[in-house]
Image: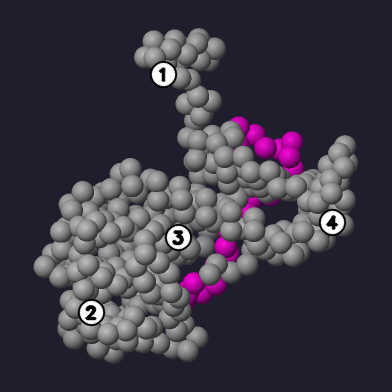
Amino acid sequence: MKFLGFITALILLSSCGSELKREDLLPDAFGPYGQVIVLMEDDLWNGPVGEAVMYHLDQNAKGVYLRPEPMFDIVRMKPDELDHVGQMNRLILKVMVDFDSTYKETAIIEKKDYFAKGQLFLIVKDSDVDRLYSFVVNEFAMIVNMMNDFTIQELITQYKTNFNPALKSKAEKDFGITLSVPEDFKTKIDSSNFIWAKRDRSKHVMPNETSEPGADTYWIQQGLLIWSVPYTDTSQLTESGVLQNRDTVLKYHVPGKLKGSYMATEYDPYYKPKSKIIKVGEAYTVQVHGLWKHAGNPAAFGGGPFVMYAIHNEKRNTVVSVCIYIYGPKYDKREYIREAEAMLKTIEFVD
């Protein structure tokens, strides 16, 4: 039956005059974003090379977190243990010693859409185990960046394909930018210079020996905030200028549930915001990673990470701020932050 299905697909594509491509017949990759299957033989995994690989993949994710989270979730297998389900994973990394060949340096082979569409399969190999170890110790950050960049790009493609048209149109009209966020964002506040939209995500937690009987549904919220102010001088595009504007605007527009509370920025030295200068197109932009909290009422609680861009729109003579925040106290935040970073990377100017 599988063979007949394959032949049918060939006939249909041929009849439509389409050029058959290998990826057209591949299934879509699935599984959690941020999960990497590492293929290594036991002797390599249990030795210095495996320890060095684990060191790099298990580093804390970059950004401001309430508690440390690893950069990736690691599933290690021996190469011959990779079954059909494993082949569908989004990220697969194979590290090996190739005694049948002779290399002058460690080889990196990048295969996209190998077993499935939307997949990155990386092979790192060498004929000299000492040189392979040296590469992993000194240059493996390149591999980590390749996997992270690929994951972000896959999310960007997803958001640009299935986006919220109303929010995209509103951002174009009022702020001069285009932004692609998932369709299930729902608008809470919509004014001429401020947008607040929210996306509720649910997770169903099954009972176990350490939990109460039954199962519970917990909510994770991703919020989108967009606002603009007239551009006056360069001090607005410093970290302190961006955060001062953020605190002023959100105190007014984003109240908490308790009277007198509002969304604020966490400035504790251990969790202080981190910023860097980037470009959106050619526009000077301040990117900030930080934590938000509720302030203004001692009884208020809640908070989590946020990522924001403050963009100098020279054509409109404004500073446009786009912030995505996360609230999910029972869960790790790494993948929600990665999603936020991907959404912000869809920003472009429209005029």
* Residue designated by label 3: 338
Q: Measured from the top left, where is residue 289 in percent x and y?
A: 42, 74
* Residue designated by label 2: 231
Magenta span of residues: 63-87
**Vertical order, 241 against 167 (above or below):** below
Mark 3 or mark 4, whichever is nearer to me: 4
* 83 in magenta: yes
Residue 135 position by quadrant: bottom right
Foreground pick, 237 / 137: 237
Instruction: Specify the amino acid type for callout 4.
Output: Arg
* Residue designated by label 1: 18
Instruction: Specify the amino acid type for callout 2.
Output: Tyr
Q: Secondary structure at mark 3?
A: helix
Instruction: Specify the amino acid type for callout 3.
Output: Arg
The residue lying at 23 percent from left, 83 percent from top is 232
* Residue designated by label 4: 131
Nearer the N terminus, badge 1 or badge 2?
A: 1
- Which label belongs to residue 32? none
* 316 in magenta: no
Answer whether labels 3 and 4 touch (C-beta < 8 Å): no
Q: Give the Cα separation between the discs numbered 1 and 3.
A: 36 Å
Foreground pick, 154 / 253: 154
In this image, 326 relative to 20: left or right? left
Foreground pick, 6 / 15: 15
Q: Measured from the top left, where is residue 285 in percent x and y?
A: 36, 71
Foreground pick, 245 / 302: 245
Nearer the N terminus, badge 2 or badge 3?
A: 2
Q: Secondary structure at mark 2?
A: loop
Mark 2 or mark 3, whichever is nearer to me: 2
The residue lying at 83 percent from left, 42 percent from top is 98
**Dot 3 surroundings within 10 Å: few (below 14), some, or many (20 or more)?**
some
Answer whether labels 2 and 3 touch (C-beta < 8 Å): no
